[in-house]
Image (cartoon, rainbow, N blue to C red):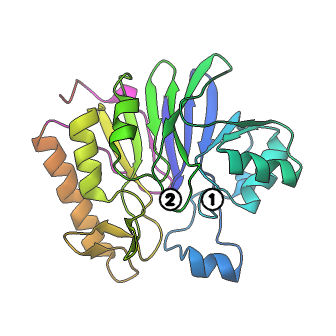
């Protein structure tokens, strides 16, 4: 297996000869996107550098998870777009042909690999889903979701090797967090017990990495963010929970990790 972080929630996952691209975002591409999703770290690859994809797994239809450049990439490569209902409708309006809409609880076999749509609790996207990829190794991709008991229950029947999960979120006075921060990622790992937890969604300014600890991601907090992530890795290690922090452009193969961390 090969896992490569392109940036934010965009991850290339190659397993059993099939390449997936999760929540592809290559922007921001215009002024509105820069306001709504002020990206601090750009993607490690441009769309024209990506020559082969079998499928895009898209959790929900927000600009920092599925953008115009992603749809152009899907059109060029002819890959299948697999995602929530609103993702599928947007892809269809763009003119894409290879589309599969999923709702939580659905299972779809793609090139011999089982794709399971998992409940996601995202207050700004009611049709959001996560994915479990069942191949030689089992990978969970959360998309944007709160730490939901329904999500956890949906995952307990899987033996997760690598959990790629949101670990920084916004906070709104009306409904609170719109997803998970790093403390939630820890509780997730303690409950679901994947072999490795990989934190994502950390490239935009204004997201809370640790709401209780008041660690917010901004252009002025990069040292604090890095220190917080390092302490989190050590905390996970001390609890015999596997953790891997990736930087944009880094490739990681969990198969090559020596021994069992638990």
Task: Report the quarter where the C terminus lies.
Answer: top left
Instruction: Specify the quadrant of the image occupied by residue 191.
Output: top left
In the rendering, at what x and y percent does residue 79 appear? 77, 37
Q: Which residue is mark 2?
A: 8
Task: Give 229 or 115, whichever is nearer the viewer.
Answer: 115
Q: Residue at x 71, y 78 (%)?
A: 30
On screen, residue 219 versus residue 38, left or right, reads left
In the rendering, at what x and y percent does residue 41 appear? 50, 69
Tag 2 and tag 1, C-beta contact below 8 Å: yes
Q: Residues within 10 Å of mark 1 (few under 14, many from 20)?
A: many
On screen, residue 203 versus residue 30, left or right, reads left
Residue 255 on the magenta segment: yes
Measure how far apart labels 2 and 1 are at the Cα level.
8 Å
Residue 38 on the magenta segment: no
On screen, residue 228 versus residue 80, left or right, reads left
Mark sitting earlier along the chain (2/1): 2
Q: Which residue is mark 1?
A: 25
Provide the residue span drawn in magenta.
240-258
Placement of 31 over or under 198, stated as above or below: below
């Amino acid at each position: 297996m090969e896992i490569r972080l392109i940036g934010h929630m965009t991850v290339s996952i190659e397993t059993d000869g099939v390449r997936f691209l999760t929540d592809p975002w290559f922007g921001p591409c215009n002024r509105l996107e820069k306001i709504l999703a002020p990206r601090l770290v750009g993607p490690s690859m441009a769309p024209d550098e990506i020559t082969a994809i079998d499928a895009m797994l898209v959790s929900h239809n927000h600009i920092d998870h599925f953008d115009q450049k992603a749809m152009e990439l899907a059109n060029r490569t002819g890959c299948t777009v697999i995602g929530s209902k609103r993702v599928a409708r947007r892809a269809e309006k763009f003119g894409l042909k290879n589309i599969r809409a999923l709702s939580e609880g659905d299972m779809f076999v793609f090139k011999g690999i089982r794709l399971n749509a998992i409940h996601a609790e995202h207050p700004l996207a009611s049709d959001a889903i996560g994915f479990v990829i069942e191949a030689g190794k089992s990978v969970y991709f959360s998309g944007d979701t709160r730490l939901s008991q329904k999500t956890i229950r949906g995952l307990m029947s899987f033996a997760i090797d690598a959990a790629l999960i949101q670990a920084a979120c916004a906070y709104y006075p009306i409904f609170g967090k719109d997803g998970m921060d790093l403390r939630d990622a820890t509780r997730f790992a303690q409950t679901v017990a994947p072999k490795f937890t990989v934190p994502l969604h950390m490239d935009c300014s204004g997201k809370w990495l640790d709401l209780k600890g008041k660690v917010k991601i901004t252009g002025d907090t990069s040292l604090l963010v890095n220190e917080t992530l390092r302490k989190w890795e050590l905390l996970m290690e001390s609890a015999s929970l596997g953790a891997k922090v990736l930087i944009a452009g880094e490739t990681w193969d969990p198969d090559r990790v020596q021994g069992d961390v638990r």
